[in-house]
Image (cartoon, rainbow, N blue to C red):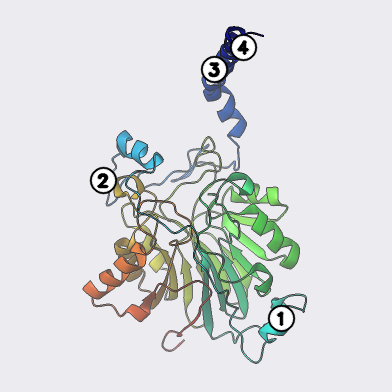
Amino acid sequence: MTGSATLRTTLRLLGAGLLWLVIVLLLAPVVIPPFLDRIYYRGPKSAHYDGAHFFNPDGEYGTGGTQRRPPAATFVRFLLGQDRSAWPEHIDVAPGYPAAQGTPCPAAKARIVESWARCVPKVDPRRMFVTWIGHATVLIQAGGINILTDPIYATHSGPFGVTGPSRVRDPGIRFEDLPRIDLVLVSHDHWDHMDLATLRRLWERDRPLIVTSLGNDTVIAGSGAKAVAKDWGERITVRPGIDVIIERVHHWGSRWMSDRNRALWSGFTVTLPGGNLFFAGDTGWGDGSWPAEAARDGPYRLALLPIGAWQPRALMSGNHIGPAEAVAAFQTLGAAHALAIHWGTFRLSNEGIDEPPALLAKTLADKGIKRDRFRALEVGRNWEVPALPGR
């Protein structure tokens, strides 16, 4: 075959390939959404459900009641990775262990027993220990039970376990070193909060009570685990004296974009001896009324509040609160203490990796709030949270 014939053949193949690509792109809006759009929940209409999709009653966009859709140019610059601060590819982490009373297995021996969980007795029900594992995953040991929030042990926060933002900080406690988990809280169905592989492992190992909001139980069922789904304002009893209350926050849900808002998003209150726990999950500020509503279910010993993935503000204000808004939520909740979550694990936005805790420290100082009341811990470190006075 001559050089010119080879060139013509190559051009024909390229032309055919481009033709098929154009066809696929033209058909995608018709074919892909019906395939990826799933019905996770069916029920009566409500103040935040129109019969097909959930919605924020205080509006979808903006902060402080300004409901403006972000400019298209902001989306483009964000998708192209412009204006992003540099992040390290990986931060070395020395994994920690759950808090324990008494004498747990020595670290050297823990590696030869079936799991560290067998070595860690339940803590005194009146005490509360909290350990940030990374992102929105937190281990809370209180009330005689072990609670895990939005557990994700995946190396990527996206479909198939190999797509999406990669993990920069490894989990602060290795999965096999987790104590037996009694209660799991899953706030919504985004990939960085609902990791089906991790939920499957927890279910197969511990059979915990998994509590979530409407529709997410359908998604979780895909992992083989079973979850209890409730609406905002509803509650479920874990054991006498310990209830989970589903709280309204300002966010959205989706696994495949075409299934946007087919399942509900939420925060949680857990009633506990010594003072309650509030977990915000993932939230924007909206009109700022959600922390005031949740405050009615206090008093709170500890609030878990996100501080990261908040820049650029024009794009993220309807999705995520930043450090300043987290402090405002902390004050509105009337919580005695707070732990900063949702930062420094997966690169989801434009701010630098250490920018959220730095701004949190500045905001606390400006407002005269002691830093030990609202902490940004390194992953794997235990913190014993004081009980509320008189509790």
Image point 44% across, 43% down: which residue?
Answer: 55
Q: Kindly indicate the quadrant of the structure image that contains residue 243.
A: bottom right
Q: Amino acid at mark 3?
A: Leu
Badge 1 is on which residue? Answer: 110
Between 390 and 341, the residue placed more toward the observer is 341
The Cα atoms of the two marked residues, 1 and 4, are separated by 65 Å
Counting residues from the start of the chain, the first of labels 2 and 4 encountered is 4
Counting residues from the start of the chain, the first of labels 3 and 1 encountered is 3
Estimate how packed mark 2 is, as few (under 14), some (14 to 19) or many (20 or more) residues with alpha carbons within 10 Å: some
**Tag 3, which secondary structure?**
helix
**Can I make out residue 297 in this image?**
no
Q: Residue furthest bottom?
A: 102
Badge 4 is on which residue? Answer: 6
Q: Amino acid at mark 2?
A: Thr
The Cα atoms of the two marked residues, 3 and 4, are separated by 18 Å
Front of the two marks 3 and 2: 3
Q: Amino acid at mark 1?
A: Ala
The answer to whether 185 is drawn above or below residue 173 in the figure is above
Between 360 and 259, the residue placed more toward the observer is 360
Question: What is the number of the mark on residue 66?
Answer: 2
Question: What is the number of the mark on residue 18?
Answer: 3
Q: Is residue 360 left or right of residue 28?
A: left
Residue 100: x and y, percent? 61, 85
Between 259 and 264, the residue placed more toward the observer is 259
